[in-house]
Image (spheres, rainbow, N blue to C red):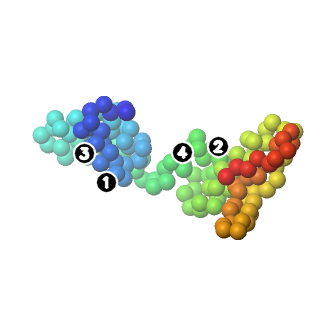
Amino acid sequence: MQVKDEKARAWYAKEAAEQTWAVRTLQRNIDSQYYYRLLSSQNTAPVEQEMQQLTTSYQQEKLEYLKNPVVAEFIGLSSNIDMTETQLESAILSNLQKFLMEPGKSYAFVARQQHIHTEKQDYYIDLDFSALHLTSPCFLS
């Protein structure tokens, strides 16, 4: 664990959950020894205000993890947070499909959201590829 002190680690976990801190806010607070600064301060209000002021930009975006430029760039999404789960899944699967097709001739793309019906339940396989050098298909779900 990044925080060795068990009391501090528990406090950071509790505060992160209660205050709905973004990951960057939590990391900044750990790096700046926020817990220990609050403990050693007789007047905690200025310390808390400073932290809130410095982390406001992190906290404003509820779906910050989706808007991370590395992630958004990789899956081809804009910084628009109005996307649906279906759009996110589609973008991720498209990139995964492109990646898996890179080897070229050894794989064949068969279907997306392949419906499999059994006596007990219906299943949907996200991506269905067949390895051409194998006799059985490869299913990714």
Q: Which tag is nearer the camera, tag 3 or tag 2?
A: 2
Q: Which residue is mark 2?
A: 74
- Distance, label 3 to label 1, CA atoms, is 15 Å
Neighbours of disc 3 within 10 Å: few (<14), some (14-19), many (20+): some
Relative horizontal placement of residue 89, taking residue 130 as reference (left or right): left
Q: Secondary structure at mark 1?
A: helix
Q: Which residue is mark 3?
A: 48
Q: Earlier in the sequence, mark 4 or mark 1?
A: 1
Q: Do the CB atoms of the residues marked 3 and 2 lie less than 8 Å apart?
A: no
Is any part of residue 14 visible from this angle?
yes
Is any part of residue 53 visible from this angle?
no
Q: Nearer the viewer, residue 37 or 118?
A: 118
Q: Which residue is mark 4?
A: 68
Expressed as whole percent of the image width and height from the top left, the position of residue 82 reads: 56, 61
Q: Earlier in the sequence, mark 3 or mark 1?
A: 1
Task: Name the image quarter holding residue 99.
Answer: top right
Neighbours of disc 4 within 10 Å: few (<14), some (14-19), many (20+): few
Q: Residue furthest front?
A: 119
- Distance, label 4 to label 1, CA atoms, is 23 Å
Residue at the image position 55 percent from the left and 57 percent from the top: 81
Q: Secondary structure at mark 4?
A: loop
Residue at the image position 70 percent from the left and 55 percent from the top: 126
Relative horizontal placement of residue 23, taking residue 78 as reference (left or right): left
Q: Secondary structure at mark 3?
A: helix
> How many numbered tags mark residues here?
4
The amino acid on which the numbered mark 1 sits, given as a three-letter code, is Glu
Neighbours of disc 1 within 10 Å: few (<14), some (14-19), many (20+): few
The amino acid on which the numbered mark 3 sits, given as a three-letter code, is Glu
Q: Which tag is nearer the camera, tag 1 or tag 2?
A: 1
Q: Which residue is mark 1?
A: 18
